[in-house]
Image (cartoon, grey):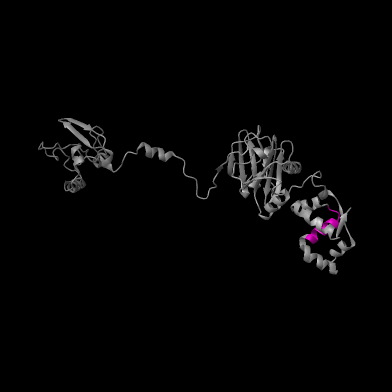
Amino acid sequence: MSRPPDSGSGEGKEARRRLPPRSPEVRKTGSGENPKEGAAPDSPSTDNQLSGLLDGLSLPEQFLAAGAVQADGTEASSMPVNVAGSGEVRLTAPPQEQIGQTTPTLEAQTRSVQSPPPPPGAPMITQLSPMFPGATPFLARFLPTVTPSHTGIQTGFCNLHDFLRFLHDQNWYGFLHAGLGEQAAYVLVYEGRTVAAAGLSSTGEQALGELLHLYDQGAPLSAYPLDKHLAHILSGVGSRAWKFNLTDDFTGLHSRPGEAVFYDQGQVVATLPAGLSYEGAFPAPLRPQTLILPRSLAGWAHHGYVATLRGRDAVNAITTAHQSFRSRYGAEGLTFQKALIDGLTPAEFALRRDVALHDLEALLKELISAGYLKDD
């Protein structure tokens, strides 16, 4: 029978399997001591192999100066040992350069927490300044400062309708301003068409008429070009702001106290340090509509006209008068003639077809003088 292990002596199968502990030793330079003295007689052979490998390794001077650990069967330490004297062992932190690392500078740490640069292709936000700071009309206070393309135009130099026709032919984008004393009027032009206007006490068609009135009274007129996207955004500015509802495709102007934000297809493209006393939005129409002069200034546009017998033959495709009319006035003239026969006024036709009213005025006069139309 086998004898049970003696618990007091630590013998037995489990005890016999344990390796004897290794006694840590440190070689002192120049002491002449044997590094293997006192080591366990049955130390693993791998310790001798490791020692042999390290014996032929040339360490940098800074390691030797710091008191590097010798290969002697003790467990390796990540910190070098500095032997100060007999029986005294002091551990010192390794210099960063000895382990291939450098301490990051404050500048590098600051850069690591900075916000990343904007991604390529991100829209640029333009900081605009108001052209008319402190202006009362909504449209006027949101107009940006730009260099005029035409300035000082007066009635003795140019007929205003001729100038508007010139802008229409140029497919021009911008705004017009005329002022006389305390009176002033502002008109936004989109694709050469007047699409928004504001005066001190009016908006829309009435404000456009106010501009014409001031010009006829001798007020100098100036024209300021705009980027077409900004002109489109401003085309929605009227007499009131709506509750702001930002969507992915919102185009228009959002105003709050002290600031106006220009949106194009849901993206902020510009800001302006001017606003309203409350928060609101001016959504831009998909296609800005042409303003029509009021009856007081363009009564002819609000009258009805009837076609003469010749005028009715002109819209009949089987008559010779039709071919003659079409060759002279084109498809647009033929469409206008048919609309008037159907009972539309020139102002209504201009709104439906989105054409400039001053262009229709010249065509209407010619159709009347040629005997195709007469006043109702």
For the point 63% across and 49% down, the residue is 228
Most extreme residue toward the left is: 32
Q: Quadrant of residue 268?
A: top right
Q: Main secondary structure of the magenta part?
A: helix
Is residue 315 visible to the viewer in this orientation of the structure? Answer: no
Above or below residue 322? Residue 82 is above
Q: Is residue 124 magenta?
A: no
Q: Is residue 318 above or below residue 71?
A: below
Residue 67 as seen in the image, left or right of residue 129: left
Question: Which region of the structure is painted magenta?
Answer: 333-344
Q: Is residue 334 magenta?
A: yes
Nearest the eye: 243 or 223: 223
Residue depicted at 89% across the width and 60% down the height: 308
- Which residue occupies the foreground of this view, 141 or 87? 141
- The N terminus, quarter of image: top left
Percent coordinates x, y for residue 319 in the rendering: 86, 69
Residue 343 picture location, percent across and down: 86, 54
Figure disc tally: 0
**Residue 314, percent from left and from top:** 84, 64
Task: Locate residue 138 relative to residue 272 in the image: left or right.
Answer: right
- Please report the residue visible at 39 percent of the width from the left and 38 percent of the height from the top: 109
| Residue 106 visible to an observer of this rendering | yes
Q: Residue at x 28, y 39 (%)?
A: 96
Q: Is residue 328 left or right of residue 278?
A: right
Q: Residue 374: where, in percent of width, then height?
A: 87, 56
